């Protein structure tokens, strides 16, 4: 098992290096001269060519690309992602300050989504083609089809404007998290319900389910202990993808609800062409995505003994 | 090649074609028997017809301003009302739907095309080439999709084709993975080995034997990726990166309409947002139906 995890880790290294190259390359394809930008940000509207040249040297921009990449990466692994052109603050600090907000939102949304999706998906699969199943399927279909900005609007209209139960936007109080989390959770629940249903349907017709029933296991144990356990691999995979995407910042929802997470922050940075921040962000979220994927891969060891055995045999 | 092997070479082709035709006919029959996907297909056809012909039904152009008639609710004269510049919302909504559908379908098809070539080569070659190619895909997967699209749109400057381009830069990853998986499965099948054995070359093998048999899941994937692309475009518009004025997609209309959220001209938001939802719903329902129809196992 340790061998399996080690192999997964080793596999991630080239992928991570690739992501770092891509993150760095963004500054090469981007138009505009960062040296000029820094000078203008510092109050010099029309910098002279000498000033620009000096700034380029100071920022190391006169070096060839690969040299700049190695420099950038080596400070990045030491926790220095440079400074934001827009705010002048260290990039890593700005991202780390905002990430917890995004993480809280993402975790609540995914947890809520799973709490809805798994029971609903199982019931839907068990009572297939019943009116309950039809209702759940149509509900999930609608939930997966409604764009998040429209859903957010409807929720605000209902809970904040009509019922006046919850605040419209901001992050001043803990209950501010409810509406954005609900918006994201509904989308997650819809797609996870569909997935749970189809994964369960696939498992319920397998021979081992018939065997489990035949040997007199209680239905509950058959469903939860056997069928669900096997369906879980697919559910965990998709949940991981969903979670990773949300941890990268739910741009729309964070913007609508003025939730100060990294998604909103990086969009502001993109509009200001704040490349050090964008680069740092891509590296940061790329790393998170890889870590989530690793966690998912490791969970297979526990979920599916074949992975463990397969690893030993190979 | 002797005449005997020539005949042998044509037989599997003919069989494959006949089997494929039967497969699609069965799928169509199964699809027809289900009310929801059929309703979705009808809705989609109506939506497409209206997106093409809708603006022609009214005497207004989508960009003709009439400030005296700004913010009028839906009426006999303006079926969907007017916006803050007095432009007819019916004409705008359907020409917007046309742009949204065009972006969605074009992006989805280009994604598929790239995915077929990339995933096909990776899956068929296998081994080290496959390993390398798929690791590159994993790398690109590490970058959040939406943020890369936003970034590229900023760099390219918003426009109809730059939006599509930004979307397909990483949009093809999913279909590449899908195609590769399919090809990996298929290439060990006896009929493929047999076809290779009698000397069928890769392009023909791919086009005649591999692709038709992998087509089912791909059709389903495209059905799901059209609404995804439409949604991504709406998101870009929402951030102010949509098609430039006076062009309007449904997404730009939603983002224009958002300011009416509290002022009460609900139709300006509800109509484009409702249309986007309807388009996405129809594609998703159709995709569900197609998946069930093409993979009878899920029907049990």
Image (spheres, coloured by chain):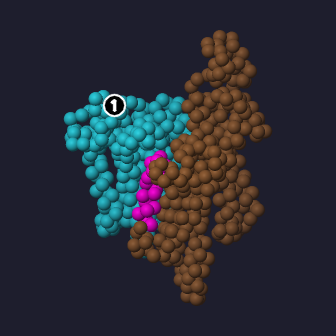
Pinpoint residue A80: horizontal percent, then vertical percent. Answer: 75, 35
Pinpoint residue A257: horizontal percent, then vertical percent. Answer: 55, 44
Residues drawn in magenta: A136-156
Q: Is residue B177 magenta?
A: no
Q: Is residue A141 magenta?
A: yes
The kind of secondary structure element at disc 1 is loop
Chain letter, cyan in picture? B
For label 1, the residue is B85
Residue A42 to residue B212: above or below: above
Pinpoint residue B272: horizontal percent, then vertical percent. Answer: 37, 44
Quadrant where the C terminus of chain A sits is: bottom right
User: In this orientation, which residue lies closer to the viewer: B91 or A294?
Assistant: B91
Quadrant where the N terminus of chain A sits is: bottom right
**Rendered residue at 67%/45% (across/down):** A99
**Rendered residue at 60%/80% (across/down):** A221
Chain letter, brown in picture? A
Q: Chain of mark 1?
A: B
């Amino acid at each position: 098992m340790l061998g399996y995890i080690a192999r997964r880790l080793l596999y991630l290294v080239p992928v991570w290096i690739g992501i770092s190259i891509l993150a760095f390359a963004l500054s090469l394809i981007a138009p505009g001269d960062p040296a000029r930008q820094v000078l203008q940000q510092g109050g010099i509207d029309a910098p002279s060519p000498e000033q620009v040249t000096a700034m380029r040297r100071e920022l190391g921009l006169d070096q060839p690309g690969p040299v700049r990449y190695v420099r950038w990466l080596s400070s990045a692994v030491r926790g220095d992602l440079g400074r934001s052109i827009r705010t002048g603050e260290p990039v890593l600090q700005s991202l780390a300050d905002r990430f917890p907000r995004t993480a809280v939102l993402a975790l609540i949304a995914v947890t809520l989504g799973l709490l809805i999706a798994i029971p609903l998906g199982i019931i839907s699969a068990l009572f297939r083609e019943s009116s309950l199943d039809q209702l759940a399927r149509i509900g999930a279909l609608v939930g997966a089809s409604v764009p998040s900005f429209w859903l957010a609007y409807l929720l605000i209209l209902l809970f904040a404007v009509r019922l006046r139960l919850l605040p419209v936007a901001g992050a001043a109080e803990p209950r501010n998290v409810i509406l954005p989390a609900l918006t994201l959770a509904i989308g997650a629940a819809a797609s996870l319900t569909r997935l749970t249903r189809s994964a369960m349907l696939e498992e319920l017709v397998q021979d081992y389910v018939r065997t489990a029933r035949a040997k007199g296991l209680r239905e509950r144990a058959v469903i939860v202990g056997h069928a669900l356990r096997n369906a879980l691999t697919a559910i965990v995979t998709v949940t991981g993808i969903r979670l990773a995407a949300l941890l990268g910042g739910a741009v729309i929802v964070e913007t609508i609800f003025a939730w100060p997470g990294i998604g909103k922050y990086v969009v502001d940075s993109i509009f200001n062409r704040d490349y050090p921040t964008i680069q740092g962000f891509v590296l940061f979220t790329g790393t998170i995505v890889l870590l989530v994927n690793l966690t998912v891969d490791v969970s297979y060891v526990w979920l599916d003994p074949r992975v463990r055995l397969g690893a030993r045999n190979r | 090649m002797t005449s005997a092997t020539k005949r042998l070479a044509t037989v599997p082709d003919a069989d494959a074609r006949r089997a494929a035709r039967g497969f699609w006919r069965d799928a169509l029959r199964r699809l027809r028997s289900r009310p929801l996907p059929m309703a979705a297909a009808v809705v989609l056809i109506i939506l497409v017809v209206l997106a093409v012909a809708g603006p022609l039904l009214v005497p207004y152009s989508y960009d003709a301003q009439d400030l005296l008639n700004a913010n009028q609710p839906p009426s006999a004269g303006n079926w969907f009302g007017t916006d803050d510049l007095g432009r007819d919302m019916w004409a705008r909504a359907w020409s917007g739907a046309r742009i949204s559908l065009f972006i969605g379908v074009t992006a989805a098809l280009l994604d598929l095309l790239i995915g077929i070539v990339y995933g096909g080569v990776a899956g068929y070659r296998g081994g080290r080439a496959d390993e390398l190619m798929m690791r590159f895909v994993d790398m690109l997967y590490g970058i959040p999709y939406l943020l890369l699209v936003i970034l590229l749109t900023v760099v390219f400057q918003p426009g109809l084709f730059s939006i599509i381009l930004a979307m397909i830069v990483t949009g093809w990853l999913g279909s590449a993975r899908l195609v590769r998986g399919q090809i990996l499965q298929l290439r060990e099948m006896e009929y493929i080995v047999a076809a290779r054995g009698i000397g069928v070359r890769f392009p023909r093998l791919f086009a005649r034997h591999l692709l038709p048999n992998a087509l089912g899941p791909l059709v389903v994937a495209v059905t799901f990726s059209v609404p995804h692309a439409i949604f991504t475009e709406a998101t870009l518009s929402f951030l102010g990166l949509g098609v430039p004025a006076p062009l309007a997609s449904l997404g730009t209309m939603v983002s224009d309409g958002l300011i009416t959220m509290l002022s009460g001209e609900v139709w300006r938001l509800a109509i484009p947002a409702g249309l986007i939802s309807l388009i996405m719903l129809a594609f998703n329902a159709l995709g569900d139906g197609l998946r069930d129809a093409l993979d009878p196992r899920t029907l049990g």
